[in-house]
Image (cartoon, coloured by chain):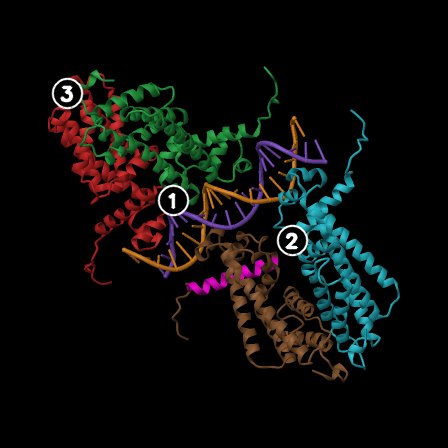
Chain colours: A green, B red, C brown, D cyan, E purple, F orange
Amino acid sequence: MPTKKKPQATPTPERRRELLAVAAEVFAARGYNATTVRRIADEAGMLAGSLYYHFDSKEAMVDEILAAFVDELGQGYDTVLRAGLGPRETVEALVAESFREIDRHRPAVAIYQKEAQHLASQPRFAYLLEAQAKFERAWLGALERGVAEKAFRDDLDTALAYRFVRDTVWAAASWYRPGGPHSPEQITRQYLSMVLDGIAVRAAPPHERL
Amino acid sequence: MPTKKKPQATPTPERRRELLAVAAEVFAARGYNATTVRRIADEAGMLAGSLYYHFDSKEAMVDEILAAFVDELGQGYDTVLRAGLGPRETVEALVAESFREIDRHRPAVAIYQKEAQHLASQPRFAYLLEAQAKFERAWLGALERGVAEKAFRDDLDTALAYRFVRDTVWAAASWYRPGGPHSPEQITRQYLSMVLDGIAVRAAPPHERL
Amino acid sequence: MPTKKKPQATPTPERRRELLAVAAEVFAARGYNATTVRRIADEAGMLAGSLYYHFDSKEAMVDEILAAFVDELGQGYDTVLRAGLGPRETVEALVAESFREIDRHRPAVAIYQKEAQHLASQPRFAYLLEAQAKFERAWLGALERGVAEKAFRDDLDTALAYRFVRDTVWAAASWYRPGGPHSPEQITRQYLSMVLDGIAVRAAPPHERL
Amino acid sequence: MPTKKKPQATPTPERRRELLAVAAEVFAARGYNATTVRRIADEAGMLAGSLYYHFDSKEAMVDEILAAFVDELGQGYDTVLRAGLGPRETVEALVAESFREIDRHRPAVAIYQKEAQHLASQPRFAYLLEAQAKFERAWLGALERGVAEKAFRDDLDTALAYRFVRDTVWAAASWYRPGGPHSPEQITRQYLSMVLDGIAVRAAPPHERL
DNA sequence: AATGAATGAGCCTTCATTCAT
DNA sequence: GATGAATGAAGGCTCATTCAT
């Protein structure tokens, strides 16, 4: 066990991460606007002004939180899309990836869901719009391909279906508690069995699938 | 001091309703906290202070908006539940009622969805908690009865299903535009065909139903 | 004596002017940066926040103060230049006009002299640069014409002379007190007799002039 | 505890002088109040806190800068006054000494001119008042003696003349650039030819003098 | 000598609210 | 019913300063 780290003196990037975690939790719980910088500082055991040694502004904090989430999710989706799966499997993978993200970065997801819309109007958060478009393409593409390839019902309104799926998935960030009664995998399975078996063209009774 | 009966174009309760409509629209668009009393007044063509002739406080405004919505929805659900329908038909009717409510009182619904949680912690808004509990009983009851009566799959996690349904339905208030491409009935039909045919025990291919 | 004015209720533009006068006095005495909004409010008998009913920001206050001064001085100089005077008389008139301005708007002039330079770097105060350039043209033009027309010595470094004159004139705003021992006219006379009789080509002993 | 005599590239008093030079430059450019300790540190290539190893406070820095200037100038003036010159030559020598000081310690002079007034109200800077009084005595003495001895015009308002001279001379610190188009000697000559030939009693045309 | 991190006071500004008219 | 003006409590942020390492 090499003792390279001086005890007590937490290195800079480490501290930032800790503080961001605290901030994310508070933002998620009370909303961005309703969260005071003082509250974050309290929770972190310091004074409000001290936060400004680490971050430029309150805005910079959400920015960093959201950017990290959006990046990671974008990469997750990319990996799914590059896997060359069929439409049904793609949807399954996207759902699984999403719930996994919620499991690991719940506060960030909750913030994203609540605040993205009105933050996106500021130039600084323009990347949120790009991300939203990208996510939409991922889902919509899978749904439309599914219809074309007869994996999904041909009377499916894909635009509407996309919205329903998106809303349900992200809303889960509001009630999901890591270590609670449902694991991400369980949620994924239940969710897919609900949604997919309503979407999928099928011949046999649905509970023989999956 | 002259006649009291000056013929006024807008008698008091009328004006209140107008102002509340304006306020609801602004609250829905920008969020309760982010909405300034001045903004509402601007939109209504008056000065901020003048609003206090009509309402006790900003809080009183959301209160009135939310209470009206919650009352109306509660009555709608009651009507559905008293109709003595089967579980599947009950779910259908609850969904239809919900989307109808969104169609008629979109801003109120949007406010409810975004703000209910954190407002509910204040005593003044305790009725929101009761309402939430009531709505949950309505949905959960229908779902559980459906499982018991074999209308819905027996491996259904009703608690999870309830959350998914609730979230999707209310989230629609964020993107639904009255007079837009989808009528409430269309949305209801599509939504039910998605969700129900995934929930319902069925023997025949799903597109022969509904 | 017509009683159109309701007693007590000072009309809006009046109040602005009063408050600006107070602000100008404080800015001049302590410097723009060192002046707190609270101090201005104190001096005006109100709370800091109340100032924002009348003005957008502290910056907006100096802006209004400086813009008014710069406009008025610009017009004064224009009037002088349009009068078609000889170079010596032009210089005399510019000096007289400047000291008159100091007499009437001493705080504004003092602020201009102390703060113009660093405020001018902000886009909002770009007009200060234009004004400076305009004033320079007025003085430099008169000096150069004076040299060309042999009213001023031909070994005069006009660029240097301009700076000396400008600095002395405006610096007077720092020590001049209206109602003090020197009237603006006295100051003008003394100043001109000092500066001009050093600049002017002359044959007879200088104390026979002016 | 090892040897005290580590050969250091920059011994303490040297480093202080360097840092003070940096500080003076920044104070002169942006004003004392507007200058942050961090800015000085940046310019010096260190962190804000590190400055406190060398100096007690930001105030201590200006103090040291101003005290040095005031001392040096005081000595310069003393030397001039002890030389036993006539009033005109004394004025010439004071001007020359002043511009020389500006050439060598421009930032300090600029700070003195801009900040002395409001700093002087603090006990710590009381010596600035003494210095001002001393400088005034030097100039005023020379001017009055000149009037008495008929070297200067008898209608001269010496109090006013003193202010004009003082203001112009120090204001030069704002625009003078060492190594620029004008040498201190040139400026001195031009300035004296402007001012003196307006002040001096003379019989012959002024451009035959000096 | 210098760094990293934090403090605490104070600043500009916003905003819900009040109230005399 | 509405206006104009003001209040007072925060809120985000800056900055000189401190101190252990």
Where does the C terminus of chain D fall, quadrant-wise?
bottom right
Q: Secondary structure at mark 3?
A: loop
Residue of label 3:
B202
Q: Amino acid at mark 1?
A: Ser
Q: In the rendered image, which quarter is residue D4 located in?
A: top right
- Name the dominant secondary structure of the magenta segment: helix
What residue is rendered at 20% in x and 16% in y?
A208
Residue at mark 3 to residue at mark 1: CA–CA distance? 46 Å
The mark total stands at: 3
Same chain letter for marks 1 and 2: no
Where does the N terminus of chain D fall, quadrant-wise?
top right
Residue B76 left/right relative to B109: left
The magenta stretch spans residue C17? yes
Residue C22 left/right relative to D62: left
Residue C143: horizontal and vertical position, in percent?
65, 74
The segment highlighted magenta reads: C11-29
Residue F7 left/right relative to C180: left
Q: Amino acid at mark 3?
A: Arg
Q: In the rendered image, which quarter is residue D200 located in?
A: bottom right
Q: Is residue C105 above or below residue B183?
A: below
Q: Amino acid at mark 2?
A: Ala
Residue at mark 1 to residue at mark 2: CA–CA distance? 38 Å
Residue of label 2:
D29
Q: Which mark is residue A121?
A: 1
